């Protein structure tokens, strides 16, 4: 806070700078942690259909081009979307299928992965992406390493990717004075 006061001897205004204790100021890490908690909560409160839409939007930002052909909202046969990823050299196109599970407490387990692997075979997928706001059990992670490649994106990965690709978020820049302004 900057305030003006009269200097009694010279009768000129003097600027004083009051600096709040550093303990009262939030650090960048605390602000980021608070944002992550709010984002996690917002994702957990999405409907399953909105979570699927959100997941497709994220993968679209990551380079997957989706088609809605043949995908149903319920009884989807173990997949929530499929599309194609074109490599940077435009030489190879990879067929990608996704499965989205929005769980508030349960982790994704091995049977979920096995069902997804079966659906991947049915749709002749080259690659799979399984997205959850929760976590994967160790057995689920092991099952994902067998057969057709599957990338697992858990809640922590999801938060990191939303920030990286700025998906439905708006970054805010703040400025803090360097010590130059307050040192003699």
Image (spheres, grey):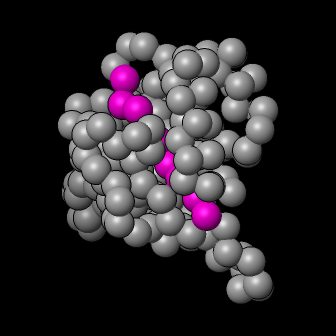
Q: Is residue 178 magenta?
A: no
Between residue 97 and residue 88, name the one nearer to us: 97
| Residue at point 38%, 13% (across, down) | 105
Quick one: 79 or 130, which is closer to the camera?
Answer: 79
The image shows residue 103, relative to residue 149, as above or below, that is above
Image quadrant in which you'd find residue 142:
top right
Q: Position of residue 143 (x, y in %)?
A: 71, 25
Query: Is 90 on the left-hand or right-hand side of 83?
Result: right
97 in the magenta segment: yes
Residue 23: percent from left, percent from top: 45, 26
Task: Answer above or below: position of 46 versus 139.
Answer: below
Residue 36 x/y as whole percent: 42, 37
Q: Residue at x 23, y 31 (%)?
A: 45
Q: Residue at x 77, y 33 (%)?
A: 145
- Count up the numbered dots: 0
Q: Nearer the viewer, residue 91 or 134?
A: 91
Given residues 118 and 58, the one toward you in this image is 118
Question: Residue 112 appears at what percent x and percent y?
Answer: 52, 24
Q: Residue at x 25, y 40 (%)?
A: 74
The stretch of residues the image draws in magenta is 95-103
Direction front: furthest residue: 122
Q: Is residue 100 above or below residue 1?
A: above
Quarter that holds the C terminus: bottom right
Q: Main secondary structure of the magenta part?
A: strand
- Horizontally, residue 90 falls left or right of residue 156, namely right
Residue at the bottom extreme, as displayed: 90
Task: State whether residue 134 appears in this view.
Answer: yes
- Residue 107 shown left or right of residue 8 in the figure: right
Q: Is residue 20 visible?
A: no
């Amino acid at each position: 806070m900057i305030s003006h006061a009269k200097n009694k001897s010279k009768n000129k205004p003097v600027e004083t700078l009051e600096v709040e204790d550093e303990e009262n100021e939030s650090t960048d890490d605390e602000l980021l942690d608070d944002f992550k908690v709010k984002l996690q909560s917002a994702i957990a409160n999405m409907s399953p259909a909105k979570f699927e839409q959100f997941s497709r939007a994220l993968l679209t930002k990551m380079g997957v081009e989706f088609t809605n052909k043949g995908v149903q909202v319920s009884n989807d046969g173990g997949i929530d979307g499929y599309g194609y990823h074109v490599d940077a050299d435009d030489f190879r196109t990879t067929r990608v299928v996704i499965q989205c599970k929005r769980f508030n407490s349960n982790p994704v387990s091995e049977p979920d992965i096995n069902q997804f692997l079966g659906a991947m075979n049915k749709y002749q997928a080259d690659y799979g992406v399984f997205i959850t706001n929760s976590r994967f059990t160790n057995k689920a992670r092991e099952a994902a390493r067998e057969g057709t490649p599957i990338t697992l994106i858990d809640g922590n990965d999801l938060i990191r990717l939303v920030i990286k690709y700025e998906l439905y978020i708006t970054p805010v820049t703040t400025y803090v004075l360097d010590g130059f302004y307050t040192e003699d």
